[in-house]
Each structure stands twice: as structure tokens, then as C-alpha cells.
Image (tube, rainbow, N blue to C red):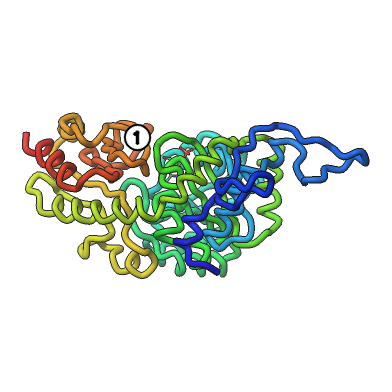
């Protein structure tokens, strides 16, 4: 099999048999003609069920992650919802104590009413994970590493092993890493989730999500039923854009990661910065685990400034190269005061600013932060 980098470069580039075009066409049709005998000769029936462009993206993602099957959704959260809906009322899910707040909100505000039982554990503490698994039967362990927004590192292979011994499945939100940096299925996870809105698309211009399953299990089949019957599917144009994004994913990430590492090291020595959260720093508590399970340390970092939330917001406000916006993974660097957009009960430190590092020259980004921190 060709190298991952070659497969990325060729994403969505199987020559079209009808025209020879080297980039696969965008299929917008919602419905497909039946043969005289009532069959669907090309395998496509109706676009909610399946669509050639979406199928291309799904097959590409399954291949890149080393999975058996993938399903693409209208957003990362639609993917999360479909996976949670494949569980049964009464099932128990273990969530990490630091994770994308949207997942926490979805679980707390929708799935708890629906009957899901939820507990939270520090996934970086294996004893705590084992104790939580021993306390009650668990169906699903949800992991995010590096986590959002504190960049905590979970030992994927170790937690997957504990979860499997306890009879639980493991899903890893791979949005921040992508298969270029970390491949959770190789480390024992059962499912990988991505918000394709971020690095996979890579240009802040599409909304999408995808689940990749290690095996074509009954859980994967149930998720597919949710996907195809409820219709939270990735639209063809987003799938086409996501395939285009994949072709440059590696080079974008390599540059972004280099800059992120450089900025994290510089911030670490800055007198106004009280903490830097970046697993590439040797002082990060998860550095050794991250070095063992990641290829590079990602392009997301967060740092804390001394003082109040208002002072941290003022630092972000003084940036002119970094854009003040939520989301991540685009070519433009973003800075965000997380505590002020997370819901009540957020445990994010008041002085924390999260950065998605883009493709600008590192000197411009460093000077921007330097100016913003010096006022
Ligand atoms: C780690 C992570 N997972 C999932 C999501 C949800 O993705 P979407 O916005 O595509 O629904 C996000 C969005 O910010 C995210 O950062």
C-alpha cells in the first residue's frame, strides 16, 4: 500500500471513468434512475442514503485511518449525535474531564434526558479510569487527546486496553490531530470521530463530520441506520471540498506544527504568561506519552495570562494578525478566550487563551502576541 502521504495527495483523485478528469466530479443529484427491472444499476438510490461524492470521502477516510467503514455527517456534532444515538437508554458513557464543550453540552442537555448515564473521569489517570470502569458497566469511553482546551494527553493504547477488558468501546475525537498526527485505530480504539470543519477541510469554509469504525460491527450498522434515516449527512459539496482539503493536509499541518512549537516555547519564557499548554514542551506532563503516540505535537496550543478574564480578553483584542474567532484548523491563525464562550459551569481557567496556529510567517505571529502581551 502506498505511504499515507501519497494516499493523502491522491484523495478524491481517482480518474473519472466517464470523462478521464483527474479530479472526481461533484455529484449533486438527489435521486438516481432505476432500471426497468426496478433495480439501481449503479448502487445509488437517493442522496440521503448514499451519494458518490460523500462515498468517496467516506472511503478515503476509512483508508487513511486504517478502518473498515466510515460515515460522513453534516457536522462533527451530527457525527457525535449519531454515535450516541446508537447506544440504548440506560447505557453508561465515560467522558473525559476536559473535552470540547459541545459534546459535554449535547450529552448533558439532550442525552441525559433521553436516558444515557454519564460519568466524568480524568483520562490521564489510569487508576481513576480503571476505578470508574470497575464501578459500573460502561458502553462507551470517549477520549480526546490532546484535549480541549487544556491539551491534556491520554495514553490511548492503555485506556483502550482497560476499556476493552471492561467490555466498553472506545471513541477518540481525532479532530485536533487528523490521521497525519495520530491514528487511534492503530492504538486500539474502535471509532475515530472528526469534525471535518477543521483541519480536514482546512480552509474554514465547510461544515462536516465523519466517524471511522475499526470494524464493520453492529454498532457501525446502527450508526449508519441513524445517518441514512435521519439525514444528518454531509452534503456533496462539503464532501468534495473535504477531499480537496485532504490533499494538502500534511503540508499544512507540518508547517503549522513547526510554528506552534516555536510559539509555545517562546510563550513559555514570557513573563506575563503563567502557563503554556502544548504537549511538545518537555515540561508538559503528557510529553512522553504524546511523543510515543503522535507524529508531531499538533498545531493547537493554549496559554494562561495572569489576571482576570477581562485582562485575557484584552490581550486577544490587541491581536491584529491572529483573528478573534472560534474554530480551528484553517490557514488563518485564530485566538479565543474559551471561558467566555463555554456554557455555565465551564472549568476553563479565566485567563486561558486558545490558539489555532495557521500558515502565517511565525515572526508575524510572535510579534503579534508580543505586542498584545506587552500593553
Ligand atoms: C474537538 C472537536 N470535536 C468536535 C467538534 C464539533 O464539530 P462541528 O463544529 O463540525 O460540529 C469541534 C468543534 O469545534 C471540536 O473542536
Few, some or many C-alpha atoms within 10 Å of disc 1 (few <14, some 14-19, many ≥20)?
A: some
Q: Is residue 131 at least partly visible in the picture?
A: no
Tag count: 1
| In this picture, residue 309 sits left or right of residue 230 | left
Q: Is residue 213 at least partly visible in the picture?
A: yes
The residue where tag 1 is placed is: 326
| In this picture, residue 119 sits left or right of residue 375 | right
Residue 311 drawn at (x, y percent): 15, 32
Residue 175 drawn at (x, y percent): 44, 49
| Among the 4 quarters of the image, the one containing residue 112 | top right
Q: Using the image, determine if residue 140 lies above or below residue 359.
A: below
- Between residues 37 and 194, which one lies in front from this camera angle? 37
The C terminus is located in which quarter?
top left
Residue 44 drawn at (x, y percent): 75, 42
| Among the 4 quarters of the image, the one containing residue 330 | top left
- Between residues 14 and 373, which one lies in front from this camera angle? 14
Mark 1 lies within 8 Å of ligand 1 (Cβ measured): yes
Instruction: Name the residue located 37 percent from the left edge and 44 percent from the top edge.
Output: 329
Q: Using the image, determine if residue 113 lies above or below residue 80.
A: above
Residue 8 drawn at (x, y percent): 48, 56
SS of the residue at dot 1?
Answer: loop
Instruction: Name the residue located 53 percent from the left edge and 43 percent from the top edge.
Output: 209
Q: Quadrant of ligand 1?
A: top left
- The residue at the far right in this view is 37
The N terminus is located in which quarter?
bottom right
Instruction: Name the residue located 26 percent from the left edge and 33 percent from the top edge.
Output: 323
Amino acid at each position: 500500500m502506498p505511504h499515507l502521504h501519497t494516499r493523502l495527495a491522491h484523495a478524491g483523485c481517482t480518474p473519472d471513468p466517464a470523462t478521464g478528469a483527474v479530479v472526481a466530479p461533484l455529484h449533486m443529484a438527489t435521486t438516481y434512475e432505476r432500471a426497468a427491472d426496478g433495480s439501481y444499476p449503479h448502487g445509488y438510490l437517493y442522496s440521503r442514503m448514499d451519494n458518490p461524492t460523500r462515498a468517496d470521502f467516506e472511503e478515503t477516510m476509512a483508508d487513511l485511518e486504517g478502518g473498515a467503514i466510515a460515515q460522513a455527517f453534516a457536522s462533527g456534532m451530527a457525527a457525535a449525535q449519531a454515535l450516541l444515538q446508537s447506544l440504548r437508554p440506560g447505557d453508561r458513557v465515560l467522558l473525559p474531564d476536559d473535552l470540547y464543550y459541545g459534546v459535554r453540552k449535547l450529552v448533558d442537555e439532550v442525552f441525559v434526558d433521553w436516558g444515557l448515564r454519564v460519568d466524568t473521569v480524568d483520562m490521564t489517570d489510569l487508576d481513576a479510569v480503571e476505578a470508574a470502569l470497575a464501578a459500573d458497566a460502561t458502553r462507551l469511553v470517549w477520549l480526546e487527546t490532546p484535549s480541549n482546551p487544556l491539551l491534556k494527553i491520554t495514553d490511548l493504547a492503555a485506556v483502550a486496553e482497560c476499556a476493552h477488558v471492561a467490555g466498553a468501546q472506545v471513541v477518540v475525537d481525532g479532530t485536533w490531530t487528523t490521521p497525519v498526527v495520530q491514528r487511534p485505530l492503530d492504538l486500539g480504539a474502535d471509532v475515530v470521530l472528526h469534525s471535518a470543519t477543521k483541519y480536514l477541510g482546512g480552509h474554514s469554509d465547510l461544515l462536516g463530520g465523519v466517524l471511522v469504525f475499526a470494524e464493520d460491527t453492529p454498532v457501525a450498522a446502527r450508526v449508519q441506520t441513524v445517518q441514512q434515516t435521519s439525514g444528518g449527512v454531509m452534503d456533496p459539496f462539503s464532501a468534495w471540498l473535504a477531499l480537496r482539503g485532504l490533499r494538502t493536509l500534511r503540508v499544512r499541518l507540518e508547517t503549522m506544527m513547526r510554528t506552534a512549537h516555536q510559539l509555545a516555547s517562546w510563550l513559555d519564557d514570557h513573563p506575563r504568561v503563567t502557563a503554556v499548554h502544548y504537549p511538545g514542551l518537555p515540561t508538559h506532563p503528557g510529553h512522553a506519552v504524546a511523543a510515543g503516540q503522535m507524529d508531531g505535537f499538533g498545531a493547537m496550543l493554549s496559554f494562561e495570562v495572569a489576571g482576570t478574564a477581562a485582562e485575557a480578553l484584552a490581550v486577544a483584542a490587541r491581536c491584529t494578525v491572529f483573528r478573534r474567532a472560534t474554530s480551528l484548523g484553517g490557514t488563518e491563525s485564530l485566538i479565543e478566550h474559551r471561558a467566555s464562550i463555554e456554557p455555565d459551569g465551564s472549568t476553563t481557567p479565566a485567563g486561558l487563551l486558545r490558539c489555532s496556529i495557521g500558515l502565517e510567517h511565525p515572526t508575524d505571529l510572535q510579534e503579534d502576541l508580543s505586542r498584545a502581551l506587552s500593553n
